[in-house]
Image: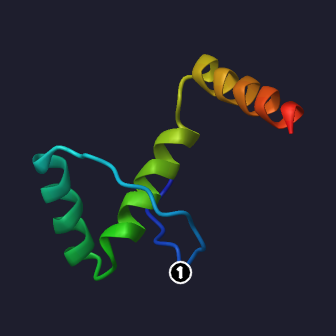
Amino acid sequence: MGSLKIPQGHTGISKTLRIPADIIEDIEALSEIKQTSLNQIAILLFKYSLENLDPEEKKLIENYKNKRNSKK
């Protein structure tokens, strides 16, 4: 398993998500411990989760993205 590396900065798209309070509590705690923003931690967790998806799930995402991009 890889080690935790906090990214420096990024450009992004604003989205609103409804996340359970207990998860937000843990993310906020981690952001304070690491002295970085809640956004940085959330992005890292999303990225890690996507990189470690089941191979079949990854394939579904790739197929969806390819199909969507071919329509453009």
Q: Classify 10 Å Cα crowding around label 1: few (below 14), some (14-19), many (20 and above).
A: few
- Please tell me in which quadrant of the rendered image residue 10 appears: bottom right
Left or right of residue 63, residue 39 in this image: left
Q: Amino acid at mark 1?
A: Gln
Q: Residue at x 36, y 54 (%)?
A: 16
Is 26 placed above or below 18 here?
Answer: below
Residue 9 lies in quadrant? bottom right
Q: Position of residue 7 (x, y in %)?
A: 52, 73
**Residue 50 position within the rendered picture, expressed as x and y whole percent measured from the top left:** 53, 40
- Helix, strand, or loop for circle 1? loop
Quarter placement of the C terminus: top right
**Residue under the image location 28 percent in, 82 percent down:** 35
Q: Which quarter of the picture shows residue 62?
A: top right
Q: How many marks?
A: 1
Q: Position of residue 21 (x, y in %)?
A: 11, 49
Residue for point 74% across, 33% down: 65
Image colouring: rainbow
- Could you tell me if residue 45 is visible in this image? yes
User: Which residue: 37% across, 64% down?
Assistant: 41
